[in-house]
Image (cartoon, helix red, strand yellow):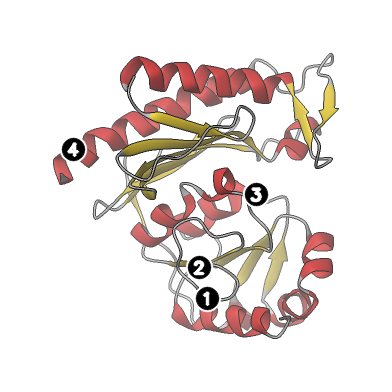
């Protein structure tokens, strides 16, 4: 199975690149139209076409495997292999021309992610991983989290500080006043930076399954800790803390639990 996952991991990376290449055809396009979904989140033709291209690439290689995506839906079967994709994670960044959006691709087995990739098409950066096989960058070099033990020396990433303050005010205040540095515009790119050892933690107070598909397998295979804000380690959490080590993670979970 390990050899099988290694080959499947190669396919995950290839499919993420195929999807990412499609986004570049639309990035910073002057005629890009933005629509609003039922939840008021933005969506563009780039999101829909990229997902269609990724689905086609998966169907060509794995015609019997189910696919679930942010834009076109689907259902994850309880058994066997399936795919979970977010064609453009960070659509708001994409719309504004900020080059930190990512394409997320995850391979699940029996509903649990076993391989995944975070790909930043504009910069060409990638981190990917597979179960018991480590985490790797775009050039095939192994990546690991940074060794940091104190929150006041840690660099923390968030996607939207205003949303974090609204949903988890104690966690937000604890990060802002207690961390060594706080940076934003993160989305999937923040988890890439954690896995690569460039920052020490990433926090998201609310997530969908397609947002989190590849994140846990990548962070854990890079040597980090990945849970919900409550500290639970479910396969597809609805909130996320990715941290470089147990001390930083424990402090962030304590802050998050004080919001409950």
> Which secondary structure lies at badge 3?
loop
Left or right position of 122 against 26: left
Q: Residue 169, relative to residue 19: is it above or below? A: below
> Which secondary structure lies at badge 1?
loop
Quarter the C terminus occupies: bottom right
Q: Kindly indicate whether the residue at mark 4 contacts the one at mark 2 (C-beta within 8 angstroms).
A: no
Pair 1/3: label in front = 1
Query: Where is mark 1, residue-wise?
Result: 231
Q: How many neighbours does mark 3 have within 10 angstroms: few (below 14), some (14-19), or many (20 or more)?
A: many
Place of residue 228 in the rendered image (x, y in percent of width and height, measured from the top left): 55, 68
Q: Kindly indicate whether the residue at mark 1 contacts the one at mark 2 (C-beta within 8 angstroms).
A: yes
Q: Kindly indicate whether the residue at mark 3 contacts the one at mark 1 (C-beta within 8 angstroms).
A: no
- The Cα–Cα distance between marks 4 and 1, rounded to whole angstroms, is 31 Å
Query: Where is mark 4, residue-wise?
Result: 4
Q: Residue 88, relative to residue 243: is it above or below? A: above
Q: Kindly indicate whether the residue at mark 3 contacts the one at mark 2 (C-beta within 8 angstroms).
A: no
- The Cα–Cα distance between marks 2 and 1, rounded to whole angstroms, is 5 Å
Quarter the N terminus occupies: top left
Q: Residue 187: which disc?
A: 3
Place of residue 173 in the rendered image (x, y in percent of width and height, measured from the top left): 79, 79
Q: Residue 213: which disc?
A: none
Pair 2/3: label in front = 2
Query: Which is nearer the N-term, disc 4 or disc 3?
Result: 4
Q: Residue 110, relative to residue 197: is it above or below? A: above
Query: Where is mark 2, residue-wise?
Result: 227
Query: Which is nearer the N-term, disc 2 or disc 3?
Result: 3
């Amino acid at each position: 199975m390990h050899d099988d996952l290694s080959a499947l991991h190669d396919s995950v990376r290839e499919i993420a690149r195929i999807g990412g290449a499609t986004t570049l055809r639309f990035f910073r396009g002057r005629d890009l139209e933005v629509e609003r979904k039922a939840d008021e989140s933005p969506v563009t033709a780039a999101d829909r076409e990229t997902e269609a291209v990724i689905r086609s690439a998966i169907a060509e290689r794995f015609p019997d495997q189910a696919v679930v995506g942010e834009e076109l839906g689907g259902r994850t079967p309880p058994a066997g292999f399936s795919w979970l994709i977010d064609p453009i994670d960070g659509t708001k960044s994409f719309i504004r021309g900020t080059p930190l959006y990512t394409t997320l691709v995850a391979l699940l087995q029996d509903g649990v992610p076993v391989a995944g990739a975070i790909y930043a098409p504009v910069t060409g950066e990638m981190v990917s991983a597979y179960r018991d096989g480590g985490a790797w960058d775009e050039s095939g070099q192994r990546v690991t989290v940074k060794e940091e033990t104190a929150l006041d020396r840690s660099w923390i990433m968030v996607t939207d500080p205003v949303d974090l303050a609204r949903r988890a005010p104690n966690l937000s205040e604890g990060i802002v006043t207690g961390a060594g540095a706080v940076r934003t515009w993160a989305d999937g790119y923040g988890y890439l930076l954690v896995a690569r050892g460039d920052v020490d933690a990433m926090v998201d107070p609310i997530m969908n399954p397609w947002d989190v598909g590849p994140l846990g397998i990548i962070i854990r295979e890079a040597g980090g800790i990945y849970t919900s804000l409550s500290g639970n380690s479910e396969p597809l959490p609805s909130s996320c803390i990715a941290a470089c080590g147990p001390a930083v993670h424990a402090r962030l979970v304590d802050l998050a639990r004080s919001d409950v």
